[in-house]
Amino acid sequence: MKNLEIPKIYSIKKTPKKTLENWFRLMTIGRAIDNKAPNYLKQAIGWSYHAPYAGHDGIQLAVGQHFEKNKDHIYLYYREMLTAIAAGMTSEEIILNGISKATDPSSGGRHMSNHFAKPEWNIHSVSSSTGNHTLHAVGTARAIKYYGEKAVAISGQGESSVSEGYVYEAITGADKEQLPVIFVVQDNGYGISVPKKDQTANRKVANNFSGFKNLRIIHCNGKDVFDSMNAMAEAKRFAIEESKPVFLQANCVRMGAHSNSDDHLLYRSSAERNYVIEYDPHAKFRRLLLRYNRFTEEELLEIEAAVKAEIKVSHKAAMNAPDPSPDSIYDFVIPEPFVSEKYPQGLHSEVGEKKKLITALNETLKAEFRHNPDTFIWGQDMANKDKGGIFNVSKGMQQEFGEKRVFNAPIAEDFIMGTANGMSRYNKKIRVVVEGAEFADYFWPAMEQYVDTSHDYWRSNGKFSPNITIRLASGGYIGGGMYHSQNIEGALVSIPGVRIVYPSFADDAAGLLRTAMRSEGLTMFMEPKALYLDPKAATVVPDDFEVPFGKARIRKEGDMLTIITYGNTTHLCLDAANKLQEEGINAEVIDLRSLIPLDEEAIINSVKKTNKVLLVHEDKVHGGFGGELSAIINEKAFEYLDAPIRRVGSPFTPVGFNRILEQAILPNADIIYKAAKDLISY
């Protein structure tokens, strides 16, 4: 979109004196703390990471002053101290963050210093992965547009972050959906020590996006207060009135090193360093106030003295604030889930008509969309005419609930996941279900956002919980080969902050999905796609069925051997157990249903009864979840074991495409039967 004229609302002559006084006070507070921060590290008090903002003063003041708390939503990057102050955070709150105190409003000392947030004001917590919050801003803007609010989402970042692929995904998505989001890119010429010429071919990174249909590009001098104020005012006006995204590029300078762990003397000449100091925006603004007789020297000195006194008081208060308690590390890992009163054990009567697993999922999704009108779902191939997902799990949903609640996402898994995170930030009522990838194997591009989202609740000290259910069609036995038949739960279980469930039967699929969608927090819902239409997985499914997290189900009682399993292999284990029963071997089969949280009580009780354990899963034995189960049993029930724990799973290879190769790799009932026989005879 062409650059348009920016209305000149603010100027040194016309801006009210009270406004100018406030701006100078905010800039002086920010610069005082910016200069003071490294001293905390030198005194071993804290602030071990500080990225000075000096040289970005104009644009950061403008962004913070145009942010309306509890209305707009803003995502600050690690260099945006002045933006945080201009948005309303106090000097004490900034110092509390810097020295990682328990009362730090950003994270209670859990996150790196210089990551400023106040979620209760919509100043959102972001991670250290540069620029990834652009996706969150887009998701939030999607919610702003859906609910019809006259507000904007703002993403602050440096120009080098634009090299990240997910930033392109965010801007592309905002352009396609025409969302009220402002990408404020503060260009100081360096990504740590990497000069801009090594980042992009265009001198101005905004020009990389000049062909975008709905994107407004605005350039401003980020060192100049008035140019930045006018540019930000126009950006916000356009984003709200036109409901279209804005790329606001602010030309800045970085007066110091990247951070206190960087030495810019190693890559910047003395001439360059002197040059940027000459263009100090704070000093320039002070000179303008005097030159145009808006303030006297005495008035400015009085403001500076008041700021100095304020910083002294804030420092003392922050130093006396409590440190985080070691015991608090277990707080806010994941929210308390929805608790079923009618089905506390996740069990029901077996009276009624059996439904296939795919039908159970489809009907539960529809029921929950009726139950909560603030529920949304998107993914690839989700809703095009009569198609509803690659496996038709969401069939008929767009027809009933409309294209604003059920819609296709681009083929960009990080975008799917990141915008789910952002949309869930809009309010706590929202529940987002995403088909994270058409096949679980394709979820890896979304892992950056998955990891970020997994620690949002902990990182924000319980102030924000991403209420998202990720659906993934998982596993093999379909002749899919690589990227269509692998299991990934063995890798996922190492990441705290996420519930992981893996049903084997239609009723459990329905009950776990309902619980996931009604709970706060992040749930990974693994669907064994080979069982979607398999009659073996069909069961009676009560319309309101709920399955608690962390409750295993005994599929077959026994007292001679415990077989622990989940997903596709549950049915294979039952087949093997029935064959063993014919030979007088009474094996107990436990269907975990939930991997995180895990029903350790059911496992240990069974081990005490049978004294022998066979762990079975479809995933590779090496690195698979069975290794963790084995360790838990060894630690907590070793004295009850009469034999070594045995594991059955896939060999340490990918799953091949040819059916002969697949059958040679994936476990089957005969392999499980033979392993059980060997264990019984030990």
Image (cartoon, grey):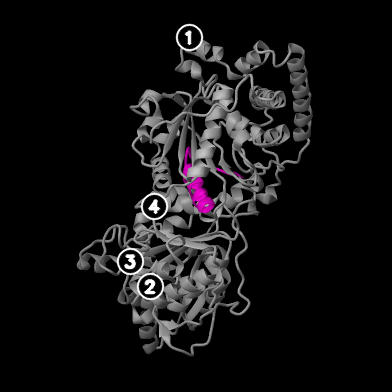
Q: Which residue is mark 3?
A: 385
* SS type, badge 2: helix
- Does any portion of residue 501 appear in the rendered image? yes
Do labels 2 and 3 touch, CB within 8 Å? Answer: no
Amino acid carrying mark 3 in the image: Lys
Q: Which residue is mark 1?
A: 271
* Residue at the image point whose x is 46% and y is 12% from the top: 269
Mark 2 vs mark 3: which is more N-terminal?
3
Residue 288: give x, y in percent of width and height: 63, 14
60 is higher (above) or lower (below) than 516? above
Q: Which residues are magenta?
A: 123-145
* SS type, badge 4: helix
What numbered label is drawn on residue 569? 2
Mark 2 vs mark 1: which is more N-terminal?
1
Which of labels 2 and 1 is toward the front? Answer: 1
Residue 496: give x, y in percent of width and height: 53, 54
